[in-house]
Image (tube, helix red, strand yellow):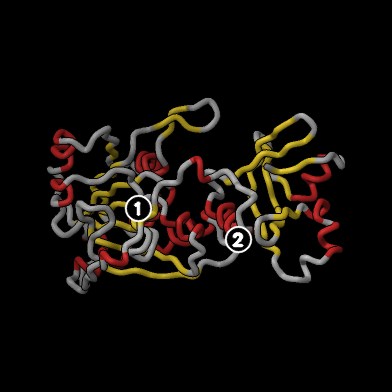
């Protein structure tokens, strides 16, 4: 049986999700011939030009790093001289060309954070939470020219817990993905694999998150708002305006809890709504547990209320 270090790959990835897979491959001594990542971009305070998480890792480990502006003929010529068994693509941010897809001896493989064909596209984790899905997972698929449509090699599902947000699911799924890709590479290399064609009739698409989606509409149901808070944490954040006196302050809502039991909606509890930061929604109530005024640190609800010194306020 062949060893994993006999497998040579090219790696395309940009984000922290991709970094988890790259570091796992590196730790297990897979022969990483080259790494491709998005070009360095301004980030943080001062908009300092910074490498992507994947690019930074590649530099620190002295891996051959390429950051092309375009996946054009010039770029193809750069990587075509490498003799590789696979290309692994994880949250890279660009579609690979037909010529690049045909470059490896075996396949171009992708780690996708959903159980395909559900939630193809850019934001599968966020869309699963927004949709109140009970389960999500990771799929390892063979890349084709069409978006996330290729045959699936393997997948693994997990339950979405009621307190999960995009950040916690991102971490869980990145770990699963990094483990599955190792197994997929080895199984394919040893011809011990099968593929499953995706059913187009069951495909759904996880569109990119729009800024307009992130503002909270308090006339919506409490569960919808709670899903939005979870789906958009830690980035880009679900937000609202706090109105007090003549001021309007932008506030990120970080953690909430739906209150819909008859006991929780008793008159006594409703009278204590301000003290507990409970907001009436279209259906049920939402308890705000953590929030973040613009430019400040995250506060729990009691510290936030103490800072207001009994001033009248409302969210809108």
Q: How many marks?
A: 2
The CA span between labels 1 and 2 is 24 Å
In the image, taking residue 181 as reference, residue 244 lies left or right, namely right
- Near-viewer residue (310 or 316): 316
Determine the residue positioned at 18% across, 56% down: 85
Q: Quadrant of the N terminus?
A: bottom left
Secondary structure type for disc 2 = helix
Residue 238 in the image: state x and y as whole percent: 58, 46
| Sequence-first tag of 1 and 2 | 1
Q: Residues within 10 Å of mark 1 (few under 14, many from 20)?
A: some
Mark number, residue 223: 2
Above or below, 292 relative to 173: above
Determine the residue positioned at 33% across, 44% down: 93
Residue 21 in the image: state x and y as whole percent: 37, 55
In the image, taking residue 164 as reference, residue 49 lies left or right, namely left
Which residue, given by chain and number where applicable, does mark 1 sit on?
121
Mark number, residue 21: none
Secondary structure type for disc 1 = strand
In the image, taking residue 1 as reference, residue 57 lies left or right, namely right
Q: Residues within 10 Å of mark 2 (few under 14, many from 20)?
A: many
Front label number (1 vs 2): 2
Q: Quadrant of residue 295?
A: top right
Residue 149 in the image: state x and y as whole percent: 25, 59
Residue 141 can be seen in this image: yes
In the image, taking residue 191 as reference, residue 172 lies left or right, namely right
Residue projecting furthest to the top: 46
- Near-viewer residue (223 or 230): 223
Determine the residue positioned at 49% across, 40% down: 211
Residue 167 can be seen in this image: no
Determine the residue positioned at 21% across, 38% down: 71
Q: Quadrant of residue 80?
A: top left
- Near-viewer residue (294 or 62): 294
């Amino acid at each position: 049986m062949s060893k994993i270090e006999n497998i040579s790959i090219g790696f395309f990835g940009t984000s922290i999700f991709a970094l988890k897979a790259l570091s796992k491959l590196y730790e297990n001594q897979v022969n990483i011939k080259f790494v491709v990542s998005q070009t360095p971009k301004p980030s943080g305070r001062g908009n300092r030009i910074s490498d992507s998480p994947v690019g930074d890792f590649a530099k620190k480990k002295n891996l051959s790093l390429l950051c092309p502006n375009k996946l054009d003929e010039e770029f193809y010529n750069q990587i075509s001289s490498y003799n590789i068994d696979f290309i692994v693509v994880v949250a890279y941010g660009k579609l690979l060309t037909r010529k690049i897809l045909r470059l490896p001896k075996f396949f171009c493989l992708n780690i996708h954070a959903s159980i395909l064909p559900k939630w193809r596209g850019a934001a599968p984790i966020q869309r699963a939470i927004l949709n109140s899905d009970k389960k999500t997972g990771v799929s390892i698929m063979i890349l084709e020219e069409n978006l996330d449509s290729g045959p699936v090699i393997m997948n693994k599902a997990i339950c979405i817990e009621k307190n999960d947000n995009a950040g916690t699911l991102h971490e869980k799924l990145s770990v699963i993905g990094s483990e599955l890709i190792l197994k997929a590479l080895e199984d394919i290399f040893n011809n011990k694999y099968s593929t499953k064609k995706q059913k187009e009739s069951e495909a759904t698409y996880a569109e990119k998150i729009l800024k307009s989606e992130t503002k909270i509409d308090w006339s919506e149901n409490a569960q919808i708002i709670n899903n939005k808070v979870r789906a958009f944490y830690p980035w880009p954040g679900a937000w609202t305006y706090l109105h007090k006196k003549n001021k309007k302050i932008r506030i990120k809502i970080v953690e909430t809890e739906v209150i819909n039991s008859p006991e929780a909606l008793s008159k006594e509890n409703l009278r204590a709504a301000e003290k507990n930061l409970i907001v009436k929604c279209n259906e049920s109530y939402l308890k705000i547990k953590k929030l973040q005024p613009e430019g400040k640190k995250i506060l729990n609800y009691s510290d936030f209320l103490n800072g207001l010194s009994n001033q009248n306020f409302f969210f809108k």
